[in-house]
Image (cartoon, grey):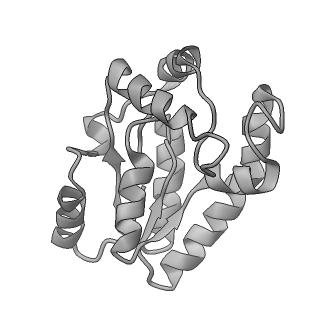
Amino acid sequence: MAGLPGSGKTTLARELEHHGFVRMCPDEQVWREHGHYGRDFPRGEYRIRERPILDRIAAELQAALGAGRDVVVDHGFWTVDEREQWRVLGELAGADVLLVYLPGDHDTLWKRIDERNRATYKDPNSMYFSEDDLRRHGSRFVAPGPGEAPLVYDGRPATVLTALADGDTPQTTR
């Protein structure tokens, strides 16, 4: 998947999980291992703590795909290089890879994040974000272009499931 915080990645990923996909979520693993960003460890250390987790998830992804499982990686994949790296991982494991782009305007994303902030200490997939954090992240996010052939998510999981069913034997969506 490709999308900023609040774009609906986890909601979609959980829906796909209900349809038999293995859901892999780096943010939840960071939370399990290190606690809450900005409370249990310094805000500037997220990427340092996330790196070994992403490496483990990459290996788990390849193993699951090699076993013929459908997988959804619940992660933002903010850059073209990052998306390309994970696309190659999937293809090397024999998967058909579908990139789902979850766009969102600032006001909608902020409203969702603000609501989620209220549950930040109860929800393992949630971390406190300020509106400035969203602006900063938005300035680093590179939306997928036509060359990446993304499926632009319309808010309906059925659209993704139909796109996957219309493929040969898709095994992963990221």
Tell me which residue sits at (59%, 43%) in the image.
Answer: 126
Image x and y of residue 74, in percent: 49, 54
Of 142 and 12, nearer the camera is 12
Tell me which residue sits at (20%, 72%) in the image.
Answer: 165
Residue 150 image-quadrant placement: top left
Tell me which residue sits at (52%, 22%) in the image.
Answer: 134
User: Farthest right residue?
Assistant: 41
Tally the numbered discs. Answer: 0
Image x and y of residue 17, in percent: 41, 69
From the viewer's perspective, is residue 103 above or below residue 1?
above
Image x and y of residue 15, in percent: 35, 63
From the viewer's perspective, is residue 121 above or below residue 43?
below
Tell me which residue sits at (76%, 30%) in the image.
Answer: 38
What is the quadrant of the C terminus in the image? bottom left
Q: Is residue 15 left or right of residue 138?
A: left
- Residue 171 visible in image: no
From the viewer's perspective, is residue 26 above or below residue 64?
above
Of 8 and 159, nearer the camera is 8
- Residue 65 visible in image: yes
Of 94 and 123, nearer the camera is 123
User: Farthest bottom residue?
Assistant: 67
Q: Is residue 9 left or right of residue 25?
A: left
From the viewer's perspective, is residue 140 above or below residue 164?
above
